[in-house]
Image (cartoon, grey):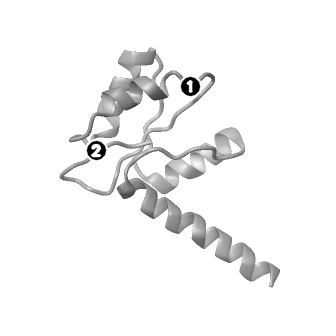
Amino acid sequence: MVFLKDKDYQDSVDQLSRIKHATFIISEPANDSRKLSGEQLQQTFYNTTHIKYPVIKDPIDAINAAKIQSGSLDLVVGSFYLLNPIRTYIKSLEDNIHDKTS
C-alpha cells in the first residue's frame, strides 16, 4: 500500500482501517518528489489503528512478502506509481508460467 503525499491519504487510511481482519504492508511509490514515505504512512496507520504495520519500501519485495505471509495476495492499494511496476511483475510471472506449460 502506498499513497502520494499530495493526496488525502488520511481519509483512505480511515476507510481501510475499517476492514475487519485486514493486514497491510506499506511500500513507497517510485516518485521521489511526490511519495509519502513509508514511515509516515506507517505512523498514520498507527495513529488510527494502534497497529504498526511493516514497511517494505520496494513494491515487488512487499508483494512477495505478502504472498509468503498470507499464501495469497488479495488487494493492492495505491497510485499508478505502485500499480504499474506490480502489474508488470505479475504479468512476467504469468508469462513464465505460460512458457513452461507450452
Callout 2: helix, strand or loop?
A: loop
Task: Tell me where residue 18 appears, x and y as whole percent.
Answer: 52, 21
Name the residue carrying label 1. 19
Label 2 is placed on what type of residue? Leu
Residue 91, how many percent across, how many down? 59, 69
Q: Quadrant of the C terminus?
A: bottom right
Reply above or below: 83 against 26.
Answer: below
Residue that numbered label 2 is attached to: 4
Single out the residue that lies furthest toward the right.
101
Q: Earlier in the sequence, mark 1 or mark 2?
A: 2
Residue at the location (51% across, 48% down)?
62
- Quadrant occupied by the N terminus: top left
Q: Amino acid at mark 1?
A: Ile
Query: For the residue labelled by badge 1, is the local secondary structure a helix, a strand or a loop?
Result: loop
Residue drawn at point x = 22 percent, y = 53 percent: 32
On the image, the x and y values in percent for residue 44 come to 34, 25
